Amino acid sequence: MRILSGIQPTGDKHLGNYSGGFRQYAATQERGEAFFCVVDLHSITAAYEPEALRRSTLNLAAMLFATGLDPARSTVFVQSHVKAHAEAAWLLSAVASFGQLGRMTQFKDKGDGKDFVPAGLFTYPVLMAGDILLYQADIVPIGDDQRQHLELARDIAQSFNSRFGETFKVPEGVYPTVGARIMDLQEPTRKMSTTSGTTQGTVRLVDEPDAVRKKFKTAVTDSGREIRRGDDKPGITNLIDILSIATGATPEQIEARYADGAGYGQFKADVGEAVVALLTPIRERYLELRADEGELKRLLRAGAEQAAATVEPTIRAVYDRMGFVAP
Ligand code: AMP
Ligand code: TRP
């Protein structure tokens, strides 16, 4: 079984990324031959600073290892190090339509009302489809917000196969059942995000333990005082999901445990401690990896070599079936 996922080196990664991304990557690497890609080429589709991109790329690679990817089992690499990704994006743009891309909600959300909308923001899902299809991935562990892009990748695979002959496997998305959408602690009706969320409501994976505790202590709760999930209780629902991710207990077990009338204050403190316990070893391993850039780059070079060898037969077949003359 082939597994592939990608994650963007933008901003500092947070608890939502852990929940919808890192946590799943480490779990799925047990299920087969896994590839995880730091998608730096995607990150130029929003305003960015070159030096920050370079730094974030290495930070994110270190975070992938720190959250449990094992270089002996998984191939971890940087997208731009494997040239076939950029090539596939162009080639697949022959079978992705303007109409399909215009329906992507991420494009509409990020593009609307901006003075400058990079063309790359529009073609972004084609690059992503290439990332996935080049590896003949069976499954793609991914956050809920990427569902539409994954569907498009499936459509692109099918269109290509029916026009040029069976070439790509049609991948399945794997979405987390709990914690697919972690919300901002201060504004629990919008998702946690380092780019569009609040600072105090976003728990970064590298936050110091005391900063984490404080963010939970000041988290916004709802009216009433029961600790249970519900559409009328976005704040508490989110905290229950977070506690579930941090401890492995199910949301039902958590509700049962707090049914005796514990107050919101105690509950928030408990969630804060559980998250500190989850993040402390991750943060330590991350700082260690980040302190040895030579070793980190060596791991990434080995990953890129492995990835390039894996995609070679597929990209060659794509050129061939599309009618390009072999060099
Ligand atoms: P990004 O940093 O936007 O590239 O996202 C990396 C991964 O984290 C993707 O799989 C996203 O779907 C996931 N993700 C981002 N924000 C959240 C969130 N608030 N809750 C759950 N998953 C998220
Ligand atoms: N678009 C994805 C996101 O923002 C990142 C991504 C790029 C990706 N290529 C991918 C995810 C391939 C899975 C597979 O989260």
Image (cartoon, grey):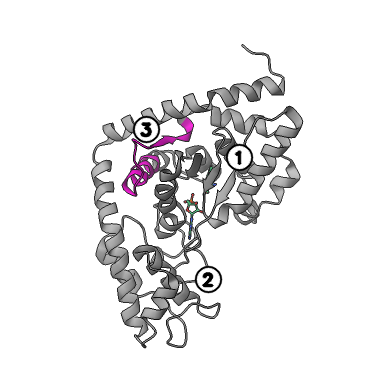
Task: Inspect the image, locate mark 2, and give the three-letter code of the amino acid beneath it.
Answer: Thr
Name the quadrant containing residue 121: top right
**Badge 3: how crowded within 10 Å, few (<14), some, or many (20+)?**
many
Count neighbours of disc 1 (C-alpha within 10 A) and say few if under 14, some if 14 to 19, many if 20 or more: many
Q: Which mark is residue 129?
A: 1
In the rendering, which numbered label is found on residue 100? Answer: none
Amino acid at pointer 1: Ala
Q: Position of residue 327 (x, y in %)?
A: 61, 11
Residue 138 appears in which quarter of the rendering? top right
Amino acid at circle 3 = Leu
User: 49 or 69, which is in the foreground?
Assistant: 69
**Front-most of residues 3 and 320:** 3
Q: Residue furthest top?
A: 327
Distance in Å between CA atoms under marks 3 and 2:
37 Å
Asked if ligand 1 lies within 8 A of label 2, the reply is: no
Which residue has dot 2 on it? Answer: 189
Q: Which residue is mark 3?
A: 300
Instruction: State if disc 2 and disc 1 touch (CB < 8 Å).
Output: no
Please give the range of residues in magenta: 55-80
Image spot of residue 110 (x, y percent): 59, 53
**Residue 187 image offset from top left, x and y in percent:** 48, 71
Say if residue 116 shows up in the picture: no
